[in-house]
Image: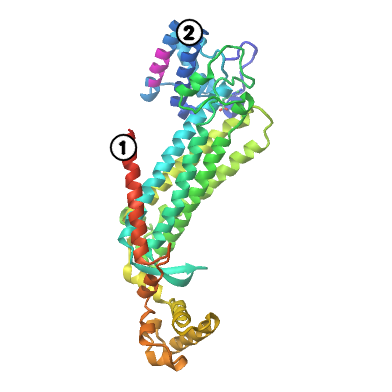
Amino acid sequence: MWGGRFGEKPSDIMQAINASIDIDRRLWRQDIAGSKAHAAMLAAQGIITGDDAAKIQDGLDQIAAEIAAGAFVFDAALEDIHLNIEARLTERIGDAGKRLHTARSRNDQVATDFKLWTMAACDAAADAVRALQAALVTRAGDHADWIMPGFTHLQTAQPVTLGHHLLAYVEMFERDFMRLSGAAGAAGEGCPLGAAALAGTGFDIDRHMTAEALGFDGPAANSLDAVASRDFALQALAALSIAATHLSRLAEEIVLWTSPQFAFARLSDAWSTGSSIMPQKRNPDAAELIRAKAARITGAFASLSGILQKLPLAYAKDLQDDKAITFEAFDAFDLCTRAMTGMMETIAFDRAALRAAAARGYSTATDLADWLVRDLAMPFREAHHVTGAVVKRAEQAGVAELADLPLADFQAIEPRITEAARALLTVEQSAASRASLGGTAPVRVREQAALWRERLARESLDLETEE
Ligand code: ARG
């Protein structure tokens, strides 16, 4: 493509480090859409003839069909997807193909393609997050009153409901959905096409026309910014990295919950792996790999940010390496969200084990202290002290749950403690009492699960009517 100035061919190693076709061939749809928009605009502006434009459109459609059919021969000597398609176009339609690159450069071309890809990838990732939320909401509704231990420091703290725990992730994923949608929107701002190599062009192009044809909100205002910037991809990776962090936390809980030590849950066969040597094992490999891939997704953000940090304006070839990182991260995320959705749809929780664990460690002690404050008007510090003494007595008596300690033992410490107070100390009562807004009580969880179900259903209905 630049043979005019060069006498020798590049060395093989030069070609190997320089070619990106194995990665960016994935942009073929975007590249063809961009070229079609560009050719139509060139013809509308009288820069190429209508006849040439028609040949280009037709040729590009045929190339799209070739690629879709797997019949296209990609050539590393042609470096990237842009040159591969352009060369094939000229091969097919002759001279008209050579006019396509008028008033553009691969610099604005690649930025345009990559923005289009990122928009779609963010939307797809947001959809995958929605599917996971739906699975979590269903399971939360089914387990609204299942009692489990709530932890701080991974030490049993207070009883909570499993539904509440699962809905906590629905909230996190909601913010991820918003961030990913925001990143899709950012990628759709400012079409780079027409920025040409870096400075714009002397041809009388219509950048509004191409921007609109490709679904951007308008043309990028500054040509240098248009070809040099990849913060749209960085923003997408930031959103993805945060979402992957949430996936990883949930994955970590699955690993803990399914261990024999916790035994809170069992993954279905479809989502477990065995050991080649230890027949008794059921391993949560998918959850573990989600943890690992989350780290790599965050690594993708760090890599791209490192690439951008030291680049003077405008384009530099470093920018070519933005795509492998971003593609890999989005592929990993897609796999991770789907695996998590599959696990969440089928994981079986053990109600008795969860309840027993919730009761261990006198997890309802705060409830007694609260009763002393509320019903006896005892200062909280004193209530804390009295409750501490009750816990000690339960421990000495070898009673597992405070609610099982005989009333006489309570009254030996504080004679005003009643049977009604003692009855409040079951894990069920404890969870039910936390009915404050956002609290763990089954009534609140059922409300929240219903709200989420409605909201997700309404949204998919809206989507259907839009389509
Ligand atoms: N393959 C290149 C990339 O992905 C396309 C742009 C090349 N531009 C250039 N001036 N060498 O960044």
> In the image, ligand 1 is in what quadrant?
top right
| Amino acid type indicated by mark 2 | Ala
Q: Nearer the viewer, residue 195 or 439?
A: 439
Q: Quadrant of residue 168?
A: bottom left
Which residue has dot 1 on it? Answer: 464
Q: Residues within 10 Å of mark 1 (few under 14, many from 20)?
A: few
- Residue labelled 2 has its Cβ within 8 Å of some atom of ligand 1: no
In contact (CB < 8 Å): disc 2 and disc 1: no
Q: Quadrant of residue 404?
A: bottom left
Which SS class for mark 1? helix
Which SS class for mark 2? helix
Q: Nearer the viewer, residue 195 or 441?
A: 441
- Indicate whether residue 62 is drawn in magenta: yes
Between circles 2 and 1, the one closer to the viewer is 1
- Indicate whether residue 162 is drawn in magenta: no
Q: Quadrant of residue 358?
A: bottom left
Q: Residue at x 53, y 34 (%)?
A: 323
Which residues are the magenta region?
A: 57-64
- Mark number displayed over residue 45: none
Q: Residue at x 40, y 82 (%)?
A: 402
Q: Is residue 176 left or right of residue 424?
A: right
Q: Residues within 10 Å of mark 2 (few under 14, many from 20)?
A: some
Which residue has dot 2 on it? Answer: 96
Q: Position of residue 11 (x, y in %)?
A: 62, 23
Report whether residue 387 is seen: yes
Q: Nearer the viewer, residue 58 or 231?
A: 231
Q: Is residue 183 above or below residue 133?
A: above
| Amino acid type indicated by mark 1 | Glu
Q: Position of residue 285 (x, y in %)?
A: 41, 54
Q: Is residue 301 left or right of residue 52?
A: right
Q: Is residue 354 above or below residue 270?
A: below
